[in-house]
Image (tube, rainbow, N blue to C red):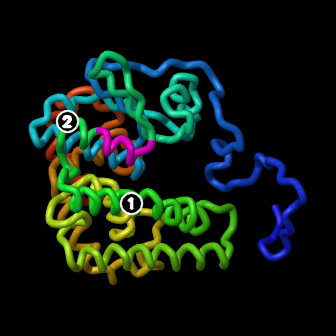
Amino acid sequence: MSDANDYVPPKVWTWDKESGGRFANINRPIAGPTHDKDLPVGKHPLQLYSLGTPNGVKVTVMLEELLAAGHSGAEYDAWLINIGEGDQFSSGYVAANPNSKIPVMVDRSGAAPIRIFESGAILIHLAEKFGAFLPTETAARAEVLSWLMWQMGSTPFLGGGFGHFYAYAPYKMEYPINRYAMEVKRQLDVLDRRLAESEYLGGSDYSIADMATWPWYGALAKGLVYDAGEFLQVHEYKNVQRWTDAIATRPAVKRGRMVNRVTGDPASQLHERHDASDFDTRTQDKLAVADGS
């Protein structure tokens, strides 16, 4: 491992399995499966294979919001994919998502199963399937989709950029941390300015744009990711804070945050969800923990 000041890129890059920091054991420069294993299939039309990271939370929140709105066809099985153990590289998972990232959904409600990978694509599929949380009027739809795509394009700078170098890289490097901190603060300012003029990202109505953005930037606003709240002075973004708090109070959001979650207080975790009854008699206590964790 060379010092940040004396590294010279080689003429031809080669894979060093020892590099990569915290997630080096699951990062590799090739695609495809590493082992044979079929994905399990539950009793509901919608099968979700995921983990309770921000990208996974987007989809479980959407599913719980659909159920809360009365769309019974949105009942789902949520299977835990342990990315630290390489579950995403099984033959079954790669067949559903050749990119080997979480989440992936298989919609079995029709004549043939449909795979949907990438969280934004899953949100759009569900919104169009159930006619909810995505406007049909042209201008309103364009606004929601614009903010959804903003999140998809912006968050890699927060996660893979700032998050990696600030929290997970094997040693601290001034240049990438400063570069990505500047960009993340610019993104927070973009959100704060939008939310100064609009209750939600797409306008006056809660939408898939909020569901996609909240798990990342809401957590960032509360200092819950990368332990970077003070470093980034997240309290300064008052409109983002208001929006974050409002969404956090929604019962479906509280439930969605619990599904496939494996970190934090055990009372806030529901590793797999196969029926609404899985939110058992301790639900209210769990939701209170999830809201404040």
**Tag 2 secondary structure:** loop
Farthest right residue? 11
The crowding category of the residue bearing disc 1, from other C-alpha atoms within 10 Å (few below 14, some 14 to 19, many at least 20), is: many
The crowding category of the residue bearing disc 2, from other C-alpha atoms within 10 Å (few below 14, some 14 to 19, many at least 20), is: some
Where is 203 relative to 211, above or below?
below
From the image, tell me which residue sits under label 1: 216
Distance from Cα at disc 1 to Cα at disc 2: 24 Å
Residue 119 within the magenta-colored segment of the rendering: yes
Q: Which residues are magenta?
A: 118-125
| Residue under the point 65% across and 27% down | 34
Q: The residue under label 1 is which amino acid type?
A: Trp
Toward which corner of the image does residue 279 lie, by quadrant? top left
Farthest bottom residue? 236
Relative depth, front residue between 220 and 152: 152
Relative depth, front residue between 144 and 21: 144
| Residue under the point 34% across and 62% down | 147
Q: Residue 279, labelled with which disc?
A: 2
Q: Going from the N terminus, do you reach mark 1 or mark 2 first?
A: 1
Residue 158 image position (x, y, % from top left): 49, 65
Relative depth, front residue between 111 and 220: 111
| Residue under the point 50% across and 18% down | 38
- On screen, residue 194 versus residue 3, left or right, reads left
- On screen, residue 200 versus residue 175, left or right, reads left
Residue 33 image position (x, y, % from top left): 63, 28
Farthest left residue? 70
Where is 63 relative to 163, above or below?
above
| Residue under the point 87% across and 54% down | 12
